[in-house]
Image (cartoon, rainbow, N blue to C red):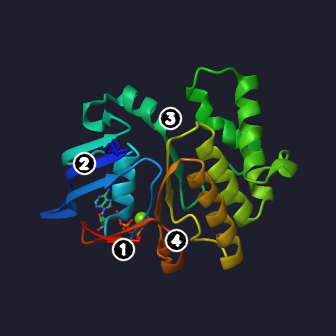
């Protein structure tokens, strides 16, 4: 079988923060390969570099040194405008705090990332409704985000990530704020997306969530170790 081209490849990625006289390597020479359709969880103690890594892969942050290639794009070679273009076409980000606009309807929330696409308002709305139906919120289209439960809000956040038809979904603690039943529903939804071919990278503190992955990566003090599933 031919070796597939990785969807995510990090080579020697270091992220250094300077605070006062101190320097801190939030990521220390991290190399990592994720194949298309893979399902990877990233675990590690608080402050170990998980969000830093996710933000760099998602193009929200740049490494101090090293190479990041996602979907064939060398992120260090992209200018700001190209980087936002990349974010808006390849990556679906699900933030722990949902990052929804509470007073707007969920349809408006899910339409938001499509503002950068070239499709008109009508098509954006249709796509938003399609994504909300896919996460089981088709009966709640007129609700604002504030009028939903935590689990429903998390589903809106996933619908919003799906709107751009991403090849990769990065989720930072997608079950962190939910009780275990609602957490299981969200994980089932994420599993479905993986069966449809979307590459999944989940950050989690929950060992039960982590064990569901095809690959588990652990990070400590900015350094990786991988366990096969
Ligand atoms: N903008 C910043 N300036 C300085 N230091 C930072 C900055 N962002 C993160 N750090 C530091 O980098 C390290 C890694 O932070 P990161 O947010 O990646 O941790 P994390 O593994 O996501 O933790 P948590 O589980 O608590 O979310 C921490 O020591 C943090 O203090
Ligand atoms: Mg974090």
Residue annotated with mark 3: 88
Q: Is residue 191 visible?
A: yes
Residue annotated with mark 4: 212
Q: Residue 77 in the image: state x and y as whole percent.
A: 25, 31
Q: Is residue 64 above or below residue 16?
A: above
Q: CA distance from mark 4 to mark 1?
A: 16 Å
Work out whether mark 2 precedes mark 4 in sequence or the reverse, and give the earlier one: 2
Residue annotated with mark 2: 63
Number of numbered markers: 4
Q: Quadrant of ligand 1?
A: bottom left
Which is more foreground, mark 3 or mark 4?
Answer: 4
| Quarter-of-image position of residue 4 | top left
**Residue toward you, 214 or 122:** 214
Work out whether mark 1 precedes mark 3 in sequence or the reverse, and give the earlier one: 1
Q: CA distance from mark 2 to mark 4?
A: 29 Å
Q: Is residue 104 visible?
A: no
Q: CA distance from mark 1 to mark 3?
A: 28 Å
């Amino acid at each position: 079988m031919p070796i597939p081209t990785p969807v995510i490849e990090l080579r020697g990625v270091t992220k250094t923060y300077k605070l006062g006289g101190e320097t801190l390597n939030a990521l220390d020479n991290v190399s990592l390969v994720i194949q298309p359709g893979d399902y990877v969880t990233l675990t590690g103690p608080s402050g170990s570099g998980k969000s830093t890594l996710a933000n760099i892969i998602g193009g929200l942050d740049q490494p101090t040194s090293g190479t990041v290639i996602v979907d064939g794009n060398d992120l260090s070679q992209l200018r700001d405008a190209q980087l936002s273009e990349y974010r808006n076409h390849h990556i679906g980000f699900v933030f722990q705090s949902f990052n929804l606009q509470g007073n707007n309807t969920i349809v408006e929330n899910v339409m938001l990332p499509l503002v950068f696409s070239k499709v008109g308002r009508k098509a954006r709305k249709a796509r938003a409704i399609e994504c909300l139906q896919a996460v089981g919120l088709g009966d709640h289209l007129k609700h604002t985000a504030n009028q939903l439960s935590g689990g429903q809000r998390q589903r809106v956040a996933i619908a919003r990530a799906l709107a751009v038809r991403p090849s990769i979904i990065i989720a930072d603690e997608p079950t962190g704020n939910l009780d275990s039943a609602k957490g299981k529903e969200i994980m089932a939804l994420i599993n479905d997306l993986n069966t449809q071919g979307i590459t999944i990278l989940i950050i989690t503190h929950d060992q039960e969530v982590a064990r569901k992955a095809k690959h588990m990566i652990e990070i400590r003090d900015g350094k990786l170790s991988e366990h096969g599933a």
